[in-house]
Image: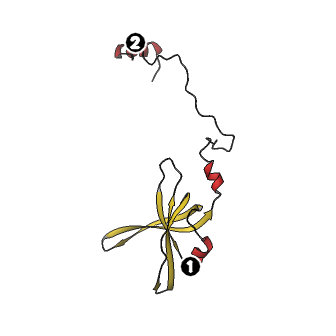
């Protein structure tokens, strides 16, 4: 899975020793640019990845991650672990929502316009009898 957004927090590094040797991990918080922004905490595991990704607060990034869950003493915990973090151009993100894009790569589409069908908003709504009379007149099979 992937998520694009801005890094808004970097938590302290954690480290320890396991049967395989020493390990280092760090958690980061990303915030999306949706109408209702979402936040997600993800982990980067390994000193080599932490150094390669070089994640800084304020960066615009695209995070590729895996989601997994594990059980501990009868309780379940989610784990969101990043395997790739790529720096994005913040200028592209700022204009992303400015125009609606054609999903097939064409020019930006115009915003839909309200049709003017000479509808009077203060006119009374049709009654059940009016609708029944109209449905008999059209003779449609459905």
Give whichever of 76, 52 is nearer the camera. 52
- Residue at 47% x, 61% y: name it: 40
Give me the residue at 53% from left, 68% from top: 82
**Residue 47 — which label?**
1
Determine contact: label 2, label 1, CB under 8 Å.
no
Above/below status of 85 relative to 124: below
Q: Of the residues tagged 2 and 1, which is closer to the observer? A: 1
Q: Does 97 appear above or below 140?
A: below
| Residue beneath the point at 60% across and 75% down | 51
Give the image location of residue 10, x and y in percent. 50, 68
Looking at the image, residue 23 sits to the left or right of residue 129; the answer is right
Left or right of 71, for residue 115: right
Q: Residue furthest left?
A: 74
Q: Say which residue label 2 marks.
A: 133
Q: Residue 100 occupies which quadrant of the picture?
A: top right
Image coordinates of residue 2 in percent, x first then y, are 55, 59
Q: Position of residue 29 (x, y in %)?
A: 49, 64
Q: Is residue 30 left or right of residue 100?
A: left
Disc 2 crowd rating (10 Å Cα; few below 14, some 14-19, many 20+) is few
Q: In terms of depth relative to the viewer, which is nearer, 132 or 64?
A: 64
């Amino acid at each position: 899975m992937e998520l694009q957004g801005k890094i808004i927090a970097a938590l302290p590094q954690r480290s320890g020793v396991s049967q395989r040797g020493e390990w280092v991990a760090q958690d980061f918080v990303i915030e999306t640019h949706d109408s209702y922004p979402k936040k997600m905490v993800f982990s980067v595991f390994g000193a080599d990845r932490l150094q390669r990704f070089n994640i800084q607060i304020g960066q615009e990034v695209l995070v590729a991650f895996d989601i997994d869950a594990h059980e501990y003493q009868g309780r379940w915990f989610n784990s969101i672990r990043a395997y790739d973090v790529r720096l994005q151009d913040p200028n592209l993100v700022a204009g992303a929502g400015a125009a609606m894009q054609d999903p097939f790569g064409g020019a930006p589409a115009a915003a839909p316009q309200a049709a003017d069908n000479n509808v009077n908003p203060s006119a009374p709504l049709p009654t059940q009898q009016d609708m029944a009379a109209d449905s008999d007149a059209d003779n449609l099979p459905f």
